[in-house]
Image (tube, rainbow, N blue to C red):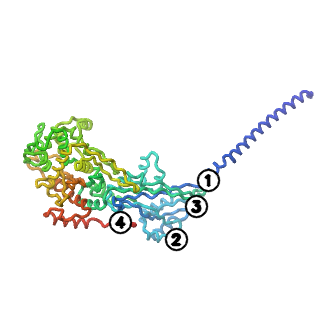
Amino acid sequence: MRRNRAENEASHAKLTRRAALLGGVQLLFVGGLAARMRYLQVDQADQFRLLAEENRINIRLIPPARGEIFDRNGIRLAQNVPSYRIVMVREDAGDVDKVMDRLAQIITIPPEIHARAVAEVKDAAPFLPVTIVDDVSWEDVSRVSVNAPALPGVTPEVGLTRIYPRGSDFAHVVGRVGRVSQADLDALETPDQLLRIPRFQVGKINVEARQEAVLRGSAGTKQVEVNATGRVMRELSRREGQSGADVQLTLDAELQRYVQARLTGESAAVIVMDCETGDLVANASAPSYDPNLFIGGISSKDYNPLLNSKYRPLVNKTVQGTYPPGSTFKMIVAMAALEEGLTGPEEITWCPGHLEVGGRRFHCWKRVGHGWMDLKNSIKQSCDVYYYDLALKVGIEKITAMANRFGLGVKHDLSLSSVAAGLTPTKDWKKRARGDEWVIGDSVNASIGQGFMLASPMQLAVMTARLATGKALSPRLIKTIDGVEQEMQEIAGLGMNENNLRMMRNGMYEVVNDRRGTAYRARIIADGMRMAGKTGTSQVRNITAAERARGVTRNADLPWERRDHALFVGFAPFEEPRYAISVLVEHGGGGSTAAAPIARDVMLQALYGAEPPLQAYPTADRGRIETQQRKLREMQPQVAIVGDDQA
């Protein structure tokens, strides 16, 4: 059928509009595509260039050198030394087993390390270096280098590792480092990327751990070019990191070494504290251990004896151990009574050898009793009944409040692990912790530092320093960080009656220097250096009525674990106190026989700054002391020279 002209024109017009619409859509699409291409190629060129660069260039961390630790005189206690290791890259080695066999002929590789290294090399990416052996000698490095043509893929490397030149002397203070564990990472909310570097070491305990933030330093970076498989082709740039800060302690390395030698054969703790600043000049726990054993991972052969020993060498007894303070606590009870006006120097109490309280008999250490006792003699002869009676007048709340003022029951802020707060009980504490009411016998037991009362040797040293000075001294362990002296808080007074404090000091002087004092045999006779102190013996077992009837078994006749703890606290010189000391000998028996002689020897060493002259000792003791000094000189290890100074 033929269309007329009008129909053709209408159809043509419709086609033209469709073509125009289609062309417009095509033009719009091409325009958008062109605009997008311009945006990607021109406007976003820098960003995509950076992304491409990141696919080719990696940024890797460079671990910093760890800060070192020194004593108060600049002697190194923890330092970094070069450490050599042998690594292998599988893609360069080819036949791993064959190369390992050749390497084993050149240097000594234990069979278990050989097998583990082969497995690690085969499991790792072909381009990654895998450590075969750590901490090899320079001679081994030389042998590997000389035989390099026969050892494809094997390379010696050098790094830094931690050592402790003073060995066991500072294990309980400086602590140790170890490889980062998953537990270390889990304990941090946002772990430093440094911690993910293989074999990176961090502080595990004590100063190494508590000062980790300043000792670690900050990482450096290096840019390396890698190929498509991720293998490093070359290093493009490097920015060194910031080494960790050096930390200087308040401790005296020579005094610490002497104390550790003096404690040989004992399970014991000694604290020596400066009475002017609160600086700890000795902080020794025995027996100790060599922290160098832990650096590369300690073997079961070395670790099990430490873990299973009844003398607990891994425990820092100075701050972790808490013990009944025994008679060293009597000055606190006396101060509470004096400050409350409930007793005075002239008041006397009759001691028949026991006190009946609530139908129970509480015994004095002296079975026949001391007779009439005043304050000074009660301290000098350590009469228990005098303090039983005093505690009934004062009450546990005031006794505990006084103990807290002297630093007992307080967790002191120190860069040491697991610092214990001890225990100074109250009526509320017993109700809350034990579900029982406080009874009068509890106060009687507390009056002689028994029952629920617990204190660490550190706390007893603080108590003694405060008694000696009347100031609220606190222990200080960190002297400088990166050479900057650590700010010391202003030392305030205790706010106590000076006459009352003087009575305590005079009583403590009599303990050591009067013939009837419990520590008379441990006195110092050098002019201007006389010591004041207090002995203590804390029971670890109950003595039954039947045992008292037949005669109390001597400590020497009991198994070691059932013997009493021996304690002594003191300060010297009496006129102008320089040092306060506390000594604990676990299961040592009597404080006068086991702890006081140690305190006297250590105090003299601290006062003289070297081996004291025999004239400082009583004449009758000089032969024995001379023999002891010779043995101690032989026992103290010779210190190796490490680097450019004496370690």
Mark 2 Cα-neighbour bin, 10 Å: few <14, some 14–19, many ≥20: some
Q: Which residue is mark 4?
A: 646
Q: Quick one: SS at disc 4?
A: strand
- Disc 2 from disc 1: Cα separation: 37 Å
Q: Secondary structure at mark 2?
A: helix
Q: Amino acid at mark 2?
A: Ala
Residue 385: which quarter of the image?
top left
Which residue carries the number 3 mark?
234
Q: Is residue 142 visible?
A: yes
Distance, label 2 to label 3, CA atoms, is: 24 Å
Of circles 4 and 3, the one toward us is 4
Q: Nearer the viewer, residue 150 or 418?
A: 418
N-term mark: 4 or 3: 3
Q: Identify the residue position indicated by label 2 in the image.
A: 150
Q: Which residue is mark 1?
A: 53
* Residue shown at the point (29%, 66%) measured from the top left: 637
User: Within 10 angstroms of label 4, few (less than 14), some, or many (20 or more) residues?
Assistant: few
Considering every residue shown, the one lying at the far bottom of the view is 146
Q: Position of residue 570 (x, y in %)?
A: 21, 53
State which tag comes first along the sequence, 3 or 1.
1
Q: Nearer the viewer, residue 573 or 293?
A: 573
Q: Which one is earlier in the sequence, the residue at label 2 or at label 3? A: 2
Name the N-terminal-most of marks 4 and 2: 2
Of the residues shown, which amino acid type is indicated by label 3?
A: Arg
Quadrant where the image shows the C terminus: bottom left
**In front: 566, or 613?**
613
Say what secondary structure mark 1 lies in: helix
- Marks 4 and 3 sit apart, C-alpha to C-alpha, by 41 Å
**Badge 1, how many Cα within 10 Å: few under 14, some, many 20+?**
few
